Image (spheres, grey):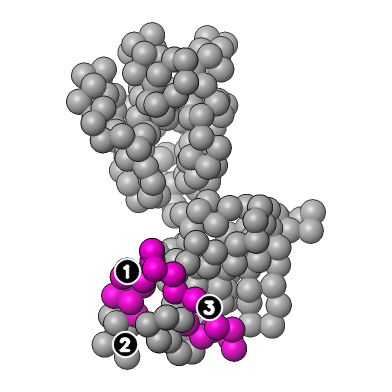
Amino acid sequence: MTAQIKCIIVDDEPTAREILEIHLSKIAEIEIVAICKNAMEAFHEINTQKIDLIFLDINMPKISGLSFAKTVSKEKKIIFTTAYREFALDGFDLKALDYLLKPISFERLLQSIDSYVEVRPLIKENYLKNSKIQDTFIFVRSDRKMVKVVFSEVCYIESLGDYLKIHFKDKYILTRQTLSSMEVQLPPHEFMRIHRSFIINIYRINSFTTEQININEQVLPISRGYKKEALARLEMINKKG
């Protein structure tokens, strides 16, 4: 029987919880037992269920992650997830396994899981055998079913409020998801964000200027906030070409 790392996510930010859930769902040996919005919900879970690992935000209302961590048994390992670098020393003083700064990439999260496996050697063999990164496609919910999205077939992704419009060459699909949560699921060597509303597949670019990109006869703007990084990557692509 395959050993499972039973974990909970504790964070008051919906987007942060969603991103962690997406990342962790890619790792075969991880079982998400509960997703909590605050420390009180987490208290209940660790007192009623077997929990191995806690992904814990620090800056939460009423009871902070640091205060909550002081009540947790040493048998349960903690990985802090926060946007605040200045709490790192406090986190490690509490014997945290790791301290992850938001936004958390999948690769960085995987390093933390590897650290946990090192201190729990009985599950290491199964973890290494089963935790494979799926980097060619994902499934998204669209029209009441799960639809396979092959990365290489995507032209660009457009944000429409609470929905995403995933554009292919001759069609598109709609899914209820944020652009930020989608971004962390995409291979960074293949996709690039150029605007708060657009992520593009760089291999689908037909032409570009310093202001816009043309893909599949659609003109997409490069916004000021993403221009520096986008133009640097486009210049690298141009040199390779």
Amino acid type at mark 2: Asn
Q: Is residue 134 visible?
A: no
Are there few (<14), some (14-19), or many (20+) residues within 10 Å of tag 2?
A: few
Mark 1 lies on a secondary structure that is: helix
**Which residue sits at x=40%, y=18%?**
64
Q: CA distance from mark 2 to mark 3?
A: 18 Å
Please state the extent of the stretch shown in magenta in the rendering: 213-234
The x and y percentages for residue 7 are 48, 28
Q: Is residue 168 above or below residue 19?
A: below
Mark 2 lies on a secondary structure that is: helix
Are there few (<14), some (14-19), or many (20+) residues within 10 Å of tag 3?
A: many
The x and y percentages for residue 53 are 42, 26
- The furthest residue to the front: 224
Mark in front: 2 vs 3: 3
Q: CA distance from mark 1 to mark 3?
A: 16 Å
Q: Which mark is residue 220?
A: 3
Q: Nearer the viewer, residue 178 or 147?
A: 178
Count up the numbered dots.
3
Mark found first going from the N terminus, 1 or 2: 1
Q: Is residue 117 left or right of residue 163?
A: left
Q: Which mark is residue 229?
A: 1
The x and y percentages for residue 38 are 52, 21
**Which residue sits at x=21%, y=19%?**
93
Q: Is residue 153 above or below residue 180?
A: below
Mark 3 lies on a secondary structure that is: strand
Q: Is residue 223 visible?
A: yes
Are there few (<14), some (14-19), or many (20+) residues within 10 Å of tag 1?
A: few
Q: Is residue 65 above or below residue 116?
A: above
Dot 2 corresponds to which residue?
238
Amino acid type at mark 1: Glu
Q: Quadrant of residue 52?
A: top left
Amino acid type at mark 3: Leu
